[in-house]
Amino acid sequence: MEAQRSVSLRLNRRGDDVLNAFLSPSGRMSPDYPMKIIWKKGFIRLFFVVGILWMLLILTVLLFHVWSCQSSITFFSAIYNKDSKVIVMLDTMGLLPKPQHRCAIPVLDDPDAVTIPKSRTPDKIVENLLYISDESVKDNSIPFSGGFVKNNSVPLFGGYQTWTQRDNSFKLNSTMKVHCGFIHNGGAEMEPKDVNYVEKCRFVVASGIFDGYDTPHQPSNISPRSQKLFCFLMVVDEKSFNFIKKNLTVRYDSDGGKWVGIWRLIVLHYPPYDEPRRNGKVPKILTHRLFPQAQYSIWIDGKMELIVDPLLMLERYLWRGKHTFAIARHKHHQSIYEEADAIKRRKRYARPLIDIQIKIYRYEGMEPWSPSKRTISDVPEGAVIIREHTALNNLFSCLWFNEVNLFTPRDQLSFGYALYRLGDSFKLFMFPNCEYNSIFLLHNHTREHSSKVEWVKDLKEFKKNSTGLIETRGGFGLFTYPVNVTSVDLPPVTRTSQAG
């Protein structure tokens, strides 16, 4: 009882103290007391109102950016592309919600309503692009640290590009002549009947299967107009063609052309490289060389099923924004150094060779991606590429392929480097990754890739020629680079995603 009485007395005293603070010396309520209460309540209300308005403003801005990204109105799409670095910075700070895996593509409703441009985009920077197609080879051996790698296939498909030629190929002129694969007798030869067929193709949907990893998947939602307008060309090697014949029905037309559904099978004889991954880059990157009459092309990897009308894709990704080259940004990575780290962790190619390639790029001035760069990413999702075959785009494809020929077939690394070397002259549209995932349905490979090179952990393993690890027709730039890049320090990499 005494304890309760003591607590009660203390509480009463505190209440009296609070009350006395607002009483005048005469014992009456202070006249300032109501004003103090009003000011206190007003400040709290003002604080909450300002906070709510600030959050609504941020939400409105974010919703506007999301809407402008998906808007079919060119003006608002341009605003989104222009200000997308702000979104990237907010995303880096963790202030944006996680992006959707799939989102609606703002395509037109009716392919018949699409207006095809009457003229091609004029070539202003590079007006005349020529290709080196024949080379006289003095020596059929490639220098290799600690010895020589004998090359029994002369000439090479990618040619014998010198380091001076490589450097000069990035210096833009109105007329240029560059290496671009297809050196005479270097491999990747089409049958005459297929050469004649593709000469009529102005609009192309291209895909490719090598080493029997996949079977063709029939596109869906293709309009009658697109079926008439586009050539659907599936590039395969002989091994894949034989695999397809055993598992699917191949139809032959009166000219001997081979068909699986809507796909015309284009068989490439004499694979130019030892490794299937590198062979697959020929039709993917050098589409303009395989199909020289094409004005527009859409590339989609062989394991994918196209589910969007290709004419609607050209309207959305090229014509609407007056672009000539479109590719999706990578879901997880923006820097090639992040991508290289992921490739090594996931054992997608020989780790020491990946290190050499990115150390060369670092030595040549390639900086990690940052919001200050002109592109929203240096790393694309390369499984879907939409392009108009302008001279500058064709040059970019050649330069991109030359890096794949010289170094590793991990083309997402060399894409960012070629982009860096061409600078502001080459412009492209990197569209949202969630749209990229809405373009196709993904199917599993029939089997896993089986290249021995992917599992190499130490450069010493390459010196054992009996292991068959050394490619005899590609990747020689890794071993012949004129500067020792062993001591080059790579920028630190922070893993931004568990999935990446």
Image (cartoon, rainbow, N blue to C red):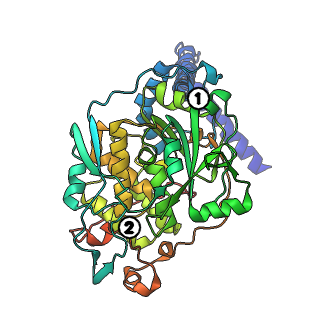
Q: Residue at x 48, y 20 (%)?
A: 74
Q: Give the image location of residue 475, x and y in percent.
A: 37, 67
Q: Earlier in the sequence, mark 2 or mark 1?
A: 1
x and y, in percent, of residue 327 in the image: 48, 41
Which residue position is annotated with label 1?
A: 312
Q: Residue at x 45, y 72 (%)?
A: 350
Q: Position of residue 4 (x, y in %)?
A: 76, 47
Q: Residues within 10 Å of mark 2 (few under 14, many from 20)?
A: many
Where 259 sits versus 204, above or below? below
Disc 2 vs disc 1: which is toward the camera?
A: 2
Amino acid at pointer 2: Gly
Relative to 77, 184 lies left or right: left
| Element type where label 1 sits in the image | helix
Q: Are marks 2 and 1 in contact (CB under 8 Å)?
A: no
Quick one: 432 or 226, which is closer to the camera?
226
Q: Vertically, is 160 above or below 98? A: below
Quadrant assignment, res 374:
top left
Q: Position of residue 194 (x, y in %)?
A: 53, 48
Q: In the orientation shown, which residue stands out farthest toward the top?
A: 31
Name the residue located 69 percent from the left edge and 34 percent from the top edge.
Answer: 221
Residue closer to the observer: 357 or 255: 255
Q: In the rendered image, is residue 93 in sight?
A: no
Given the image, on which type of amino acid does mark 1 rest?
Answer: Leu
Residue positioned most to the right: 1
Residue at the disc numbered 2: 474
Q: Horizontally, is 195 left or right of 105 in the view?
A: left
Q: Secondary structure at mark 2?
A: loop
* One can see residue 348 in this view: yes
Q: Nearer the viewer, residue 153 or 460?
A: 153
Q: Quadrant of residue 440?
A: top right
